[in-house]
Amino acid sequence: MTTDPRWTKSSYSNNGGECVEVAANLAPHGSVPVRDSKNPHGPALTFDTSAWSAFVAGVKAGDFEA
């Protein structure tokens, strides 16, 4: 059975339209697709769940602040 992605836009999407959408519902299947919200029919990058979790943890920890 194939599960369709349920895309969720960033809660920070009112910052001028430069946003991504994430289909976190696919994480139990081993991957997390991410796409440009301005191009919903374009390509999506797919990340392994462990890589995505490490990225989110880094964002929350402030590791990517300029």
Image: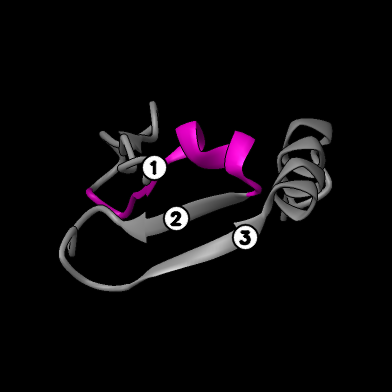
Contact, mark 1 vs mark 3 (Cβ under 8 Å): no
Q: CA distance from mark 2 to mark 1?
A: 21 Å
Horizontal side of 9 relative to 66 (left or right) equals left
Q: Nearer the viewer, mark 2 or mark 1?
A: 1
Q: Which residue is mark 1?
A: 1
Looking at marks 2 and 1 on the same chain, the residue that comes earlier in the sequence is marked by 1
Horizontal side of 20 relative to 38 (left or right) equals right
Q: CA distance from mark 1 to mark 3?
A: 20 Å
Q: Amino acid at mark 1?
A: Met
Contact, mark 3 vs mark 2 (Cβ under 8 Å): yes
Describe the element under mark 3 as helix, strand or loop. Answer: strand
Describe the element under mark 1 as helix, strand or loop. Answer: loop
Q: Is residue 29 magenta?
A: yes
Q: Residue furthest top?
A: 11
Residue drawn at (62%, 60%) of the image: 47
Query: Is residue 66 positioned above or below 13 on the image?
Result: below
Query: Is residue 38 positioned above or below 9 on the image?
Result: below
Residue 3, given in percent of the width and then of the height, sits at: 37, 40
Q: Is residue 35 magenta?
A: no
Looking at marks 3 and 2 on the same chain, the residue that comes earlier in the sequence is marked by 2
Q: Which residue is mark 3?
A: 47
Looking at marks 1 and 3 on the same chain, the residue that comes earlier in the sequence is marked by 1
Q: Which residue is mark 2?
A: 34
Q: Quadrant of the C terminus?
A: bottom right
The magenta stretch is 17-30
